[in-house]
Image (tube, grey):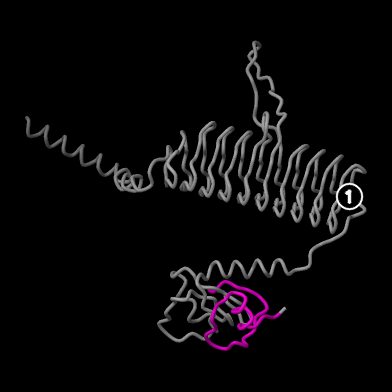
Amino acid sequence: MNFTAAVIAEFLQGTVEGDPQASVSDVSKIEEGKDGTLSFLSNPKYEKYIYDTQSTIVIVNEDFSPVKEIGATLIRVKNAYESFAALLQFYEQSKPKKIGVSNMASISDTASLGEDLYIGDFTVVSDHVTLGAGVQLYPQVFIGDNVKIGEGTILHPGAKVYEGCEIGAHCVIHAGAIIGGDGFGFAPNQENNYQKVPQVGKVIIEDHVEVGANTTIDRATMGATILRKGVKLDNLIMIAHNVEVGENTVMAAQTGVSGSTRIGKNCMFGGQVGLIGHITIADNVKIAAQSGIPKSIRQEGAIVQGAPAFDFGYYQRCYVVFKNLPSLRNQIIDLERKVSDLSQ
């Protein structure tokens, strides 16, 4: 499908600089641009590529000022990155959706099925499951008893949802994710063994949540582990039992959240962040990658880094010191030697 610069600019509420009839049928990175493709420039470090790119159309910010001639047609918008993302989302939504139920799927007679479903090969839909309209279950998905899934939600191949869990509307669960596995609950007994504590709760995932590949979200011991509306989880994340994640919070890969932790809304966690259990994280908190959080963060909007983590700005100032500790140590040893020589 081809789109002209004029059509794209109208959709993005931008302005065309160049040929309004320039046409594209694909997208490409600006540094790998090809004729007939659309690129974008948002980060100034990539500006050097726009002067030689072969992309036919490039989306740029309104305030972009080129230092030399550009061959591509430009579309100027308020925010090039957001506009490009919106365009990709529109393109993705315009693609035809899969519909139909495979005769190799196993579907319980007691399941309630909405309209326009897609259920792929070897998918299992268990007893008393409720699937909303437009749900897509790709091959080898497992849906346990009494699960509820809202309209338009997509589960990619191999995703597993254990019994009793609830997933809202327009969510995306990527391949290999496990929703509702047992929380890590064991109690030592008199025989010096660990006795399993039954996990009888569930997982509740609200609307517009995305869960990355091979991410695990454990069911609650009692009650529910909850992901609020708009949460976005990267691949390989661990959410333990009875955790609650607030609206629109995002977490990068390999983050681990221990049990019964409460996380506020609009938080941002970098990769490999680790949180101890039974703590509270306030709204709008940002945690830098590889940070360890040993206690609650109650200040809204705090930015922290380190293990254990503390104020980001203070951490940066400390880093200047501790990265030079070997040199400082040698200076101290040298000074001690000189002092010793003088005292003799």
The residue segment tinted magenta is: 2-31
Q: In this view, does 237 lie to the left or right of 306?
A: right
Does the magenta segment cover residue 310? no
Residue type beneath disc 1: Ala
Q: In this view, does 232 lie to the left or right of 290?
A: right
Q: In which quarter of the image is the N terminus?
A: bottom right
Q: Quadrant of residue 127?
A: top right
Local crowd size for mark 1, using a 10 Å CA cut-off: few (<14), some (14–19), many (≥20): some
Q: Which of 122 and 6 is in front in this view?
A: 6
Q: Is residue 94 left or right of residue 258?
A: right
Image position of 247 with respect to 27: above or below = above
Reading the image, the residue beneath label 1 is 105
Report the number of discs: 1
Residue drawn at the location 16% of the way across and 35% of the way down: 336
Residue drawn at the location 66% of the way across and 75% of the way down: 26
Q: In which quarter of the image is residue 341?
A: top left
Does the magenta segment cover residue 28? yes
Q: Which of 248 and 44 is in front in this view?
A: 248
Q: Nearer the viewer, residue 318 or 110?
A: 110
Q: Which of 125 and 236 is in front in this view?
A: 125
Q: What percent of the width, then of the height, locates residue 244?
A: 60, 39
Secondary structure under tag 1 reads loop
Q: Is residue 301 left or right of residue 162?
A: left
Q: Quadrant of residue 134?
A: bottom right
Q: What percent of the width, then of the height, locates residue 13?
A: 57, 76
Q: Quadrant of the C terminus?
A: top left
Residue drawn at the location 93% of the way across and 43% of the way down: 109
Image position of 183 with respect to 248: above or below = above
Residue drawn at the location 56% of the way across and 81% of the way down: 54
Q: What percent of the width, then of the height, locates residue 191?
A: 66, 11
Q: What percent of the width, then of the height, locates residue 36?
A: 64, 81
